[in-house]
Image (spheres, helix red, strand yellow):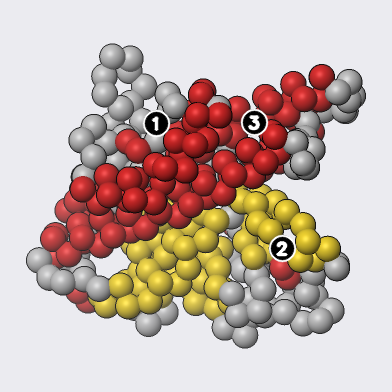
Amino acid sequence: MIPAAVGVDIGCGMMAVKTDLKARDLPDNLAPLRTAIERAVPHGRSSTRGKRDRGAWHDLPEVVSHAWKEQLSARFDVLAEKHRVLKKTNNANHLGTLGTGNHFIELCLDEHQSVWVMLHSGSRGVGNRIGTHFIELAKKDMERMFVNLPDKDLAYLSEGTAHFNDYVEAVAWAQDYARINREIMMQRTLDAVAKTLERRVLGVEQAVNCHHNYVAREHHYGKDVLLTRKGAVSAKKDELGIIPGSMGARSFIVRGWVTKKASARAATVPDASCLAPKRRSGYPSSNMPRPPKAWSVAKMPVWWTKRRPPIKTSTR
């Protein structure tokens, strides 16, 4: 397995929830909603030395503390004992936080004027450290085995070795971290919206909580393999996925539709960040069978927020 191919944002992915709100339930000015969400979910990063990072927790909320202790800490301690460089990372204090780059939280409307919450994030600082650490270990393994590669980033971990086994274990943990991270942010966002609107807000349909940078054990062409998807999601029959649009563009909730002829190709659908600009508003390839049903999810009009952009940490 090539750690650099998996990358450092392990488990990065999307989550979308359809709420019981309609467009008519929202105020004309969305600025208070945006402010409430930004207060509920740490985002960005402080670059000034000596100041606390605004993108991390300093006092863990109960939901974060409970999730860390009950679902993540024990396995992390085992990993950190074998790879001590992981101990001094942003782990628990980044759980339930958004991050930087193209990670975002946004409110969307579908064709029926239902309000959705969509977000994009991954395994944060600890996932980044896992990625960089094992990339360096792979390079050292290549040097030790006198393997010459055309590019150092093609360095791989051989199956059956201790480093390979540890990496598979670490990636699985980071992907679980990323999934839980999105779940916590989603709940805190829904709570912030409910508090601002002074009404109960329910998630009536969870379209998906899926990674698009990840490793999975699957069976293809008669073999059991560890498959790496980079900027892509599984699109097997009836599987739901998200193709996020750029800021101001539509996103798509899609359902896998696989024919025998296209079964191998349709097992993976790239997300919008990997598509050519002319294809961003629709499906990734004319060679890919179109699902029988897809939900178009539009961003909120900019003027609703008094010319403030949709709730994102940055543009794509």
User: Which residue is located at x 47 percent, y 63 percent?
Assistant: 209
Q: Is residue 240 above or below residue 8?
A: below
Seen from this angle, which residue lies furthest top? 50
Residue 167 visible somewhere in the drawing? yes
Q: CA distance from mark 3 to mark 2?
A: 22 Å
**Percent x, y for residue 233?**
62, 61
Q: Which mark is residue 90?
A: 1
Q: CA distance from mark 1 to mark 3?
A: 17 Å
Residue type highlighted by circle 2 = Glu
Callout 3: few (<14), some (14-19), or many (20+) C-alpha neighbours within 10 Å? many
**Percent x, y for residue 245?**
52, 59
> Would you say 305 lies left or right of 272 here?
left
Of the numbered discs 3 and 2, the one sitting upstream in the chain is: 3
Residues 200 and 69: in front is 69
Q: Is residue 219 above or below residue 153?
A: below
Q: CA distance from mark 1 to mark 2?
A: 31 Å
Residues 128 and 115: in front is 128
Q: Which mark is residue 134?
A: 3
User: Which residue is located at x 45 percent, y 72 percent?
Assistant: 207
**Percent x, y for residue 222?**
85, 68
Of the numbered discs 1 and 3, the one sitting upstream in the chain is: 1
Residue 300 visible somewhere in the drawing? no
Residue type highlighted by circle 1 = Asn
The residue identified by callout 2 is 218
